[in-house]
Image (spheres, helix red, strand yellow):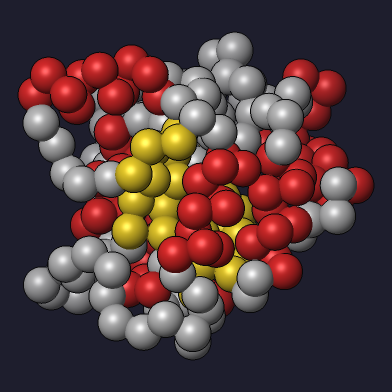
């Protein structure tokens, strides 16, 4: 079984200007390729998990998204890193029209994308991590049994302020993805065994 670091996309890996989907608009945060390269070198899979309701809303297509993710992989590779998987949720519970407008098990904060990646890539969720900038990211990771880290890029500062006011799930906080990755490598090697946070108590329902 592999250990993985699940990575939110917009606000964690790249600047988010709202429903970003054109390859030429991709702008990675400083240090992102290096961070992913360090994960690769430490034996962790780097897996992107991203909500993409712009597809349900009709703002862009699956083909557009695939082109964007090809550019993402290329830019990470140019910095010496490797993205091992990209999973996206095209649904929205209310917006848009058609079959993609529905409640689903893959849209964060649901953990469906993480479960799917675990099945596809043979990932030990209990020994894995999720890094993101929103509460929904942290909840998805926690529900899947992963350890979680909040980065203060994107919506991270707003998220941290909300969590401080209202309380929330345990997590670590870092200014950037690179700092989070250095902490992951320093505190938990790929050989580490056992769940990092309480796992879910029942197997997930099948993805629809």
Viewer-closest of 88 and 1: 1
Query: How far from the left and from the top, in percent, is residue 192?
Result: 42, 81
Query: How far from the left and from the top, in percent, is residue 38?
Result: 70, 59
Q: Against 66, is 159 above or below?
A: above
Query: How far from the left and from the top, in percent, is residue 117?
Result: 48, 67
Query: In the visual, does 8 lie left or right of 201?
Result: right
Q: Against 172, is 27 above or below?
A: above
Say whether residue 108 is visible: no
Say whether residue 154 is visible: yes
Query: In the visual, does 57 lie left or right of 29?
Result: left
Quadrant assignment, res 195: bottom left
Q: Residue at x 33, y 16 (%)?
A: 158
Query: In the visual, does 201 lie left or right of 26?
Result: left
Viewer-closest of 148 and 62: 148
Q: Residue at x 30, y 23 (%)?
A: 159
Viewer-closest of 124 and 106: 124
Viewer-closest of 189 and 21: 189
Q: Residue at x 22, y 57 (%)?
A: 143
Q: Against 202, is 12 above or below?
A: above
| Quadrant housing the C terminus | bottom left
Q: Residue at x 58, y 19 (%)?
A: 16
Q: How many marks?
A: 0
């Amino acid at each position: 079984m592999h250990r993985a670091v699940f990575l939110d996309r917009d606000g964690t890996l790249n600047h988010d200007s709202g429903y970003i989907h054109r390859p030429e608009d991709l702008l990675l945060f400083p240090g992102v390729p290096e961070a992913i390269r360090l994960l690769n070198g430490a034996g962790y899979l780097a897996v992107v998990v991203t909500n993409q309701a712009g597809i349900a809303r009709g703002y862009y297509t699956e083909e557009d998204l695939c082109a964007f993710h090809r550019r993402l992989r290329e830019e990470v590779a140019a910095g010496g890193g490797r993205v091992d998987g990209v999973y996206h949720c095209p649904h929205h519970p209310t917006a848009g029209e058609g079959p993609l407008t529905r409640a689903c098990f893959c849209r964060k904060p649901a953990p469906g994308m993480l479960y799917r990646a675990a099945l596809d890539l043979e990932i030990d969720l209990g020994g894995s991590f999720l890094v993101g900038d929103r509460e929904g990211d942290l909840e998805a990771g926690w529900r899947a049994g992963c350890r979680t880290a909040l980065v203060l890029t994107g919506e991270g500062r707003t998220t941290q302020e909300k969590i401080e006011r209202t309380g929330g799930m345990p997590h670590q906080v870092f200014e950037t993805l690179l700092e989070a990755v250095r902490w992951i490598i320093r505190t938990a090697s790929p050989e580490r065994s056992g769940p990092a946070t309480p796992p879910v108590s029942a197997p997930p329902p099948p993805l629809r």
